């Protein structure tokens, strides 16, 4: 079993969020998973240009580090997303990674994968940022087991508590994957999205050739 952790703080080794990610990955390793951490803030990932190449051909036209990251995410059983709160949002580095992933959303390529999300902040605005990461995973067809957030405003012991919670969540991520845990509310979102989005795919079938062929192959569009 492979778990990939995504670190997106530009603070690198000085990041409080990285402490949570390292703990979650340690927990996953303790539960028997093979782990890998990827710092997207150190990679060259350019902005999406909305060229539609991925929808037409299944391949992004931009040549940078994104392809390598995507390959590792697609090969993983579980993903740990992490980002500090930057102006009530994820960092620009993580948002750019998300923006480069329309193919993953259109073709639900994280179907069968599980994730958890981690964040830190100087304020209490944690759930909004966790929801951004969780919602991205669900929109890509995957499932999320939840997340851990920590506010510096809670005092010096807060980060230690969050580190331990992250370690526990890392172990639980492995268990969720092993038991193929079901989340009925998330599965309902997947089904509703596919029912709606098939009409978008059909409306663009002349330009989204790869997407359309994929949906037909999966049986989501009936010929």
Image: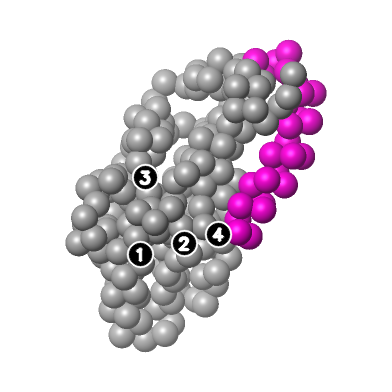
Q: Residue at x 56, y 37 (%)?
A: 108
Describe residue 80's horizontal placement relative to residue 54 as left or right.
Answer: left
Where disc 2 sits, the SS reads strand
Q: Residues within 10 Å of mark 2 (few under 14, many from 20)?
A: some
Cα–Cα gap, marks 3 and 2: 13 Å
Of mark 2 and mark 4, the one earlier in the sequence is: 2
Residue under the image location 36 percent in, 45 percent down: 77
Q: Nearer the viewer, mark 2 or mark 4?
A: 4
Q: Position of residue 36 (x, y in %)?
A: 25, 46
Q: Which residue is mark 2?
A: 145
Verify CB contact (< 8 Å) between mark 3 and mark 2: no
x 71%, y 27%: residue:
221
Tell me, yes or no, whether the two marked residues, 1 and 3, touch with CB atoms within 8 Å: no
**How are the colours assigned in the image?**
one colour
Query: Which residue is disc 4 drawn over?
Result: 183
What residue is pinned by disc 3?
77
Q: Which residues are magenta?
A: 184-209
The span from disc 2 to disc 1 (Cα, nearest Å) is: 8 Å
Q: Is residue 151 magenta?
A: no
Residue count near mark 3 (Cα–Cα under 10 Å), binned few <14, some 14–19, many ≥20: many
First-in-chain label (1 vs 4): 1
Q: CA distance from mark 2 to mark 4?
A: 8 Å
Instruction: Say if the magenta span includes residue 188.
Output: yes
Residue that carries the numbered disc 1 in the rendered image: 172
Tell whether label 1 touches label 2 (CB within 8 Å): yes
């Amino acid at each position: 079993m492979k778990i990939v952790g995504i670190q997106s703080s530009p603070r690198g080794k000085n990041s409080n969020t990285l402490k949570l990610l390292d703990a979650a990955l340690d927990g996953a390793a303790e539960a028997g998973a093979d782990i890998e951490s990827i710092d997207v803030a150190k990679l060259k990932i350019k902005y999406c240009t909305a060229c539609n190449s991925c929808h037409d051909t299944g391949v992004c036209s931009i040549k940078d580090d994104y392809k390598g990251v995507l390959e590792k995410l697609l090969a993983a059983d579980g993903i740990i997303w992490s980002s500090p709160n930057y102006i009530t949002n994820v960092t620009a580095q993580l948002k750019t990674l998300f923006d480069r992933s329309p193919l993953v959303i259109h073709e639900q390529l994280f179907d069968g994968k599980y994730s958890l999300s981690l964040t830190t902040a100087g304020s209490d605005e944690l759930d909004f940022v966790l929801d951004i990461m969780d919602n991205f995973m669900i929109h890509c067809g995957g499932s999320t087991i939840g997340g851990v957030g920590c506010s510096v405003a809670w005092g010096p012991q807060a980060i230690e508590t969050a580190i331990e919670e992250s370690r526990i969540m890392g172990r639980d991520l492995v268990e969720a994957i092993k038991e193929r845990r079901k989340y009925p509310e998330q599965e309902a979102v997947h089904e509703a999205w596919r029912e709606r989005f098939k009409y978008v795919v059909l409306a663009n079938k002349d330009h989204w050739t790869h997407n359309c062929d994929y949906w037909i192959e999966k049986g989501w569009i009936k010929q």
